[in-house]
């Protein structure tokens, strides 16, 4: 329960905004954008609807902040993976990171950025478009990294970095969908290992 203190009506007081945002992220992660009602969100966050609006804006703005938190937290394996010294290492780290993040027992299964708004009504269209952009950005970062690998001679010159990046990111997003369906971690890892056996060599 939030503690009310003196101040302008609706001004968020007496709660940890960082913790509240973490809880909102978990609700969106588990239920998706449209499946997360305001009542479910505010109950999980431990604040009133008035305080939620004052601290985070409307539901869409709250989702945007939750997605930023997800990107910097559970999904932070991607920028770390891009720093691997080889393209194969990048791909392996992306897939392993996806498996680890989407199957962690203490968190919802799946990926907030994949399942947050795969289907959405007109009212959720902006969130759906936001997540399309989020996924496209991941793809673009991987493509640029693989282009460097081609330029450096690590990947064969005939390699299409865009196609290879699409292959790896599609696998990662597919892992998230399978994880949300209850496919166990060891089976997902076996699939990832199999997918990388025919990696292009210079």
Image (cartoon, helix red, strand yellow):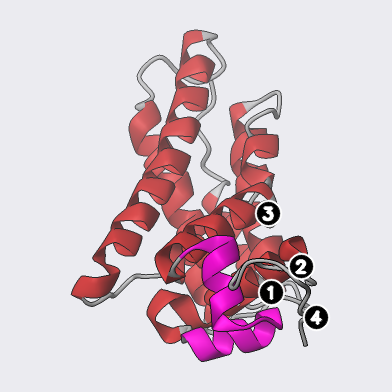
Task: Name the residue: 64% across, 89% down.
Answer: 43
Pointer 4 local density, CA inside 10 Å: few below 14, some 14–19, many at least 20: few
Residue assigned mark 4: 3
Of residue 38 and residue 147, the one placed in the foreground of this image is 38
Q: Position of residue 87 (x, y in %)?
A: 59, 29
Q: CA distance from mark 1 to mark 3?
A: 25 Å
Can residue 182 be seen here?
no
Mark 4 or 2, nearer chain start: 4
> Height in image: 202 above or below 165?
above
> Height in image: 112 above or below 89?
below
Asked if disc 3 and disc 2 are in contact, CB closer than 8 Å, the reply is no
Asked if disc 2 and disc 1 are in contact, CB closer than 8 Å, the reply is yes
Q: Is residue 119 left or right of residue 174?
A: left
Asked if disc 4 and disc 2 are in contact, CB closer than 8 Å, the reply is no
Pointer 3 local density, CA inside 10 Å: few below 14, some 14–19, many at least 20: many
Question: Magenta segment, principal secondary structure?
Answer: helix
Can residue 99 be seen here?
yes
- Quarter assignment of residue 42: bottom right
Q: Is residue 164 left or right of residue 183?
A: left
Q: CA distance from mark 3 to mark 4?
A: 42 Å
Residue assigned mark 1: 23
Task: Name the residue: 35% across, 19% down.
Answer: 158
Mark 1 or 3, nearer chain start: 1
Residue assigned mark 3: 96
Span shown in magenta: 38-57
Mark 3 or 2, nearer chain start: 2
Give the quarter of the figure containing the N terminus.
bottom right
Residue assigned mark 2: 19
């Amino acid at each position: 329960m939030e503690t009310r203190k003196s101040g302008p009506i609706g001004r968020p007081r007496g709660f940890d905004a960082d913790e509240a945002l973490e809880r909102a992220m978990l609700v969106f992660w588990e239920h998706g954008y449209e499946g997360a009602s305001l009542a479910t969100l505010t109950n999980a966050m431990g604040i009133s609807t008035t305080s939620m609006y004052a601290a985070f804006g409307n539901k869409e703005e709250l989702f945007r902040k939750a997605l930023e938190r997800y990107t910097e937290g559970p999904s932070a394996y991607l920028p770390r993976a891009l720093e691997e010294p080889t393209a194969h290492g990048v791909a392996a780290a992306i897939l392993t990171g996806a498996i680890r993040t989407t199957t962690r027992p203490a968190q919802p299964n799946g990926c907030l950025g994949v399942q947050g708004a795969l289907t959405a009504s007109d009212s959720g269209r902006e969130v759906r478009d936001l997540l399309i952009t989020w996924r496209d950005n991941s793809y673009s970062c991987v493509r640029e990294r693989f282009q460097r690998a081609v330029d450096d001679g690590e990947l064969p010159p005939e390699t299409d970095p865009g196609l290879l990046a699409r292959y790896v990111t599609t696998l990662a997003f597919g892992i998230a969908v399978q994880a949300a369906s209850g496919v166990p971690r060891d089976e997902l890892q076996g699939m990832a290992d199999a997918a990388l056996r025919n990696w292009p060599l210079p």
